[in-house]
Image (cartoon, rainbow, N blue to C red):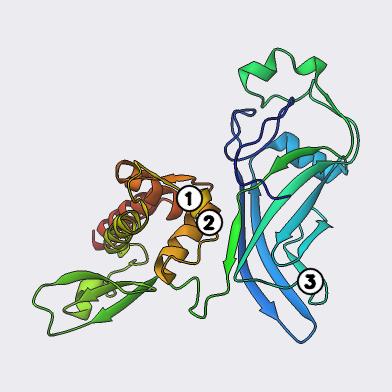
Amino acid sequence: MIYKKDASFSYPVFSNTSSSYLNSEFYFDVTSLETNSKDYLFTFKYVISSVFIEELLRSGKASLIIIIQSSDNYFKEIPYGVNEITVPKKRLSLSNKTTLQLHIQSKDDIYFDNCMELSPFYEVIKDNIHIEKHKLIGYSNIVSYSGSKVKPLEIIHKVVDPKLPIAFKVELSSSTIILQFKEEAYQLNGMVPHNNLMNMYIYEGLSRALTQFINDNIGDEEFIDLTELSGSTQVSDLDQKLLDLMENKGISELHPGNIDEVIALISNKIVEKYVDSVREVGNYAG
């Protein structure tokens, strides 16, 4: 079972949206999917911020399980630290909307008296918390794989158009955010270092795309419930890519007032990295 919304448990559960732990980052992402005549090969990465949970996994008191929900449902225990899994095609058929999630399950009785990471609510009663084996104790964000013909990870496309009447312009196609430049120099490729100097353009492109996403999907509501929109066949390729990005970061709502917060989550410190690059350029020039 994949948890798309917060679920209620009578004990602490580790997830990105849970208040059971003071710091509960359980980030999961599929970095590549390869296929041959017999198998699918999923390569992924994950981050677990809890030392307590990591120790349970390392000691074998808990296990990491990958859940794949598609036309067929598939789950398998994976050793802690492993970042790829091979799934026979005879066991799994990828649909147009396949979702994946990591679960953490207890393999032994677990006690929390030595856990120093719980929220105040559980901290005062942790000596009495006992979880039996085979119970869910954590779950990650959801990763969505779309069977779209367009490449799902290609969301930003850059072009140089000397005929452009202005220096920079954002255009949204059906599948990408197009950053248009009148001159190649405006892309700042000649700067050292320049890796994140493009972020100011990318930020504007994401803001424009999310605004269009809202206009396309909000209807008469005050916000978009992304969990309800998930799986819809009516969204454009670009909207689907944005939806996948937001779901992968555990974002459940989108509205005009939280666009900047959403960009911060899906872009991994885009402003901070831009500022750092500007400072490095200044230091290099000096």
Of helix, strand and loop, which one carries label 1? helix
Of helix, strand and loop, which one carries label 3? strand
Q: CA distance from mark 1 to mark 3?
A: 30 Å
Above or below residue 214? Residue 256 is above
Q: Nearer the viewer, residue 133 or 94?
A: 94
Q: If the image is split into quadrants, where does the C terminus sit?
A: bottom left
Disc 3 residue type (three-letter) = Thr
Disc 2 residue type (three-letter) = Ser
Image mark for residue 230: 2
Image mark for residue 249: none
Residue at the spot x=79%, y=62% of the render? 74
Above or below residue 81? Residue 146 is below
Could you classify mark 1 by the number of other residues whose Cα lies within 10 Å: few (under 14), some (14-19), or many (20 or more)? Answer: some
Image mark for residue 226: 1
- The residue indicated by pointer 3 is 86
Q: CA distance from mark 2 to mark 1?
A: 6 Å
Residue at the spot x=32%, y=61% of the render? 209
Return the x and y of residue 184 as percentages of the image width and height.
Answer: 22, 80
Return the x and y of residue 85 as percentages of the image width and height.
Answer: 77, 67
Q: Residue lying farthest bottom?
A: 37
Above or below residue 210? Residue 71 is below
Q: Nearer the viewer, residue 162 or 250?
A: 250
Q: CA distance from mark 3 to mark 2?
A: 26 Å
Discs 3/2, front: 2
Q: Give the left or right position of residue 188, taking residue 11 as reference.
A: left
Q: Disc 3 or 2, which lies upstream in sequence?
A: 3
Could you classify mark 3 by the number of other residues whose Cα lies within 10 Å: few (under 14), some (14-19), or many (20 or more)? Answer: some
